[in-house]
Image (cartoon, rainbow, N blue to C red):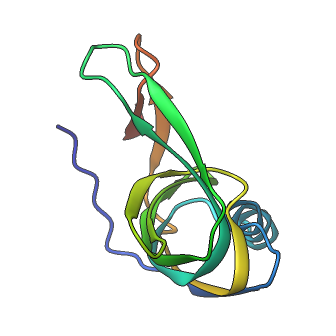
């Protein structure tokens, strides 16, 4: 286990997306434009016409993922995650009229009517992501 702390909170960023916009690509564009290094996605709601995500399919040491695409009227119930060193890692929960789906957000989640996201910047957090020998991402101190 690793714990990282900061007492500094920076900007609160609210992003409103409209019909046809790509959720993840739009966030990446804003991360770059705002020069956002580290932050927390604390809220994401809206409606989608396409949801793309992946989820694990095994308990083995090496992860195996399955990729899913849903193209129906879809509600974005929530998304959360971290932005570490400018790279978003978000998980989302979406639903259509029959089922609820959850997993790692992929590029290609397309807004139907609107989506609204809120991000809190952590300007003094000193962390980066590194891959271990299995290709699994871990957050570690950038001071190491």
In the visual, does 139 lie left or right of 28?
Answer: left
Q: Pinpoint residue 78: horizontal percent, then vertical percent.
A: 42, 75
Q: Pinpoint residue 40: horizontal percent, then vertical percent.
A: 45, 68
**Residue 10 in view in this figure:** no
Q: Residue at x 52, y 68 (%)?
A: 123
Q: Quadrant of the C terminus?
A: top left
Relative to residue 36, is residue 14 depicted above or below? below
Q: Pinpoint residue 4: horizontal percent, then vertical percent.
A: 28, 52
Residue reaching furthest front? 98
- Image quarter for residue 50? bottom right
Relative to residue 92, is residue 13 depicted above or below? below
Q: Pinpoint residue 119: horizontal percent, then vertical percent.
A: 52, 77
Front position in the image: 24 or 11: 24
Q: Residue at x 76, y 60 (%)?
A: 25
In the visual, does 14 lie left or right of 65?
Answer: right
Q: Quadrant of the N terminus?
A: top left
In the visual, does 77 lie left or right of 31?
Answer: left
Total number of numbered labels? 0
Q: Residue at x 80, y 65 (%)?
A: 29
**Residue 104 in view in this figure:** yes
């Amino acid at each position: 286990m690793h714990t990282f702390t900061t007492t500094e909170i920076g900007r609160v960023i609210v992003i409103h997306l409209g019909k046809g916009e790509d959720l993840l690509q739009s966030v990446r564009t804003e991360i770059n434009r705002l020069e956002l290094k580290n932050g927390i996605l604390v809220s994401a709601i809206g409606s989608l016409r396409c949801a793309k995500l992946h989820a694990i399919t095994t308990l083995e040491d090496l992860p195996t993922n399955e990729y899913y695409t849903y193209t129906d009227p879809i509600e974005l119930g929530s998304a959360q995650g971290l932005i570490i060193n400018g790279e978003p890692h978000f998980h989302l929960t979406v639903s259509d009229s029959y089922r609820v789906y959850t997993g790692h957000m992929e590029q290609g989640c397309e807004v139907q009517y609107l989506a609204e996201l809120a991000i809190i910047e952590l300007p003094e957090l000193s962390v980066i992501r590194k891959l271990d020998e299995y290709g699994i991402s871990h957050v570690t101190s950038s001071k190491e």
